[in-house]
Each structure stands twice: as structure tokens, then as C-alpha cells.
Image (spheres, rainbow, N blue to C red):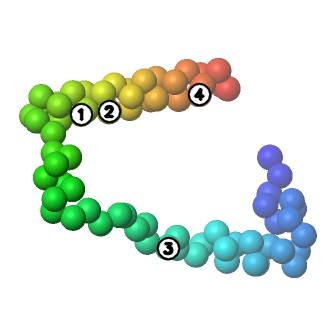
Amino acid sequence: MEKLSQVLEPDETDDHHAKILQPSPPKRTANMSRRESATSSCSTDEKAMIAAKRKLREVYQEAEDAKRQLAHN
């Protein structure tokens, strides 16, 4: 595998590393009013279902990643 300094031009190397090391800006989330959050609240069953779906997606993604990892080795 080639080293980064061999791939980039010598004058690009320092600038490229500086860009990589810069922290990303903080993420902004939309503010919801109290009325919006009250009307969009879920029942306990719905929250449990959403959590179960999220967990299932995470486990599926981990399995897909592991499968890809095995295929590359």
C-alpha cells in the first residue's frame, strides 16, 4: 500500500493533513415547539416497536459489514 506522502504532491501534503485534522462543525438540530412535541409523542408500544426496528437494522448492518469483511480477506 502506498504511503499518503507518495500519493499526494509534496506541497499538498501539509494542507491535506490540516484539513483532515480540523474538527467538524457542531451539528444543528431543528427546535420543536412544545405543542409539536406533544402531538408527535408516541405510545409506549410505538416506542418499543421503533426501538426494536432500530436494533434490527443495526444488527443487520453489522452482519452485512462482517460478511463484506470476510469477502475481502
**57 over 26 or under it: above or below:** above
Dot 1 and dot 2 residues touching (CB under 8 Å): yes
Outermost right residue: 9
Q: Which picture quadrant has residue 30?
A: bottom left
Label 2 vs label 4, nearer the camera: 2
In this figure, which residue is indicated by the disc labeled 3? 25
Q: Circle 2 sits in a helix, a strand or a loop, which is it?
A: helix
Disc with the residue nearer the chain's start (1 vs 4): 1
- SS at mark 1 in the image: helix
Q: Which amino acid does the dot numbered 1 rest on?
A: Ala
Percent x, y for residue 22? Answer: 58, 75
Among the 4 quarters of the image, the one containing residue 49: top left
Per the rendering, the mark at residue 51 is: 1
Seen at 84% across and 74% down, the residue is 12
Q: Which residue is mark 2?
A: 54
* Amino acid type, label 2: Arg
Residue 70: x %, y % from top left:
59, 22
Residue type for callout 3: Pro
CA distance for labels 1 and 2: 5 Å
| Residue 53 x, y percent position in the rendering | 30, 27
Instruction: Please report the residue visible at 24 percent of the width from the left and 33 percent of the height from the top.
Output: 51
Which residue is nearer to you in this view: 48 or 20?
Answer: 48
Does 42 sit above or below residue 61? below
Mark 4 belongs to which amino acid? Gln
Crowd tier of the residue under label 1, counting other residues whose Cα lies within 10 Å: few below 14, some 14–19, many 20 or above: few
- The answer to whether residue 24 is above or below residue 7 is below
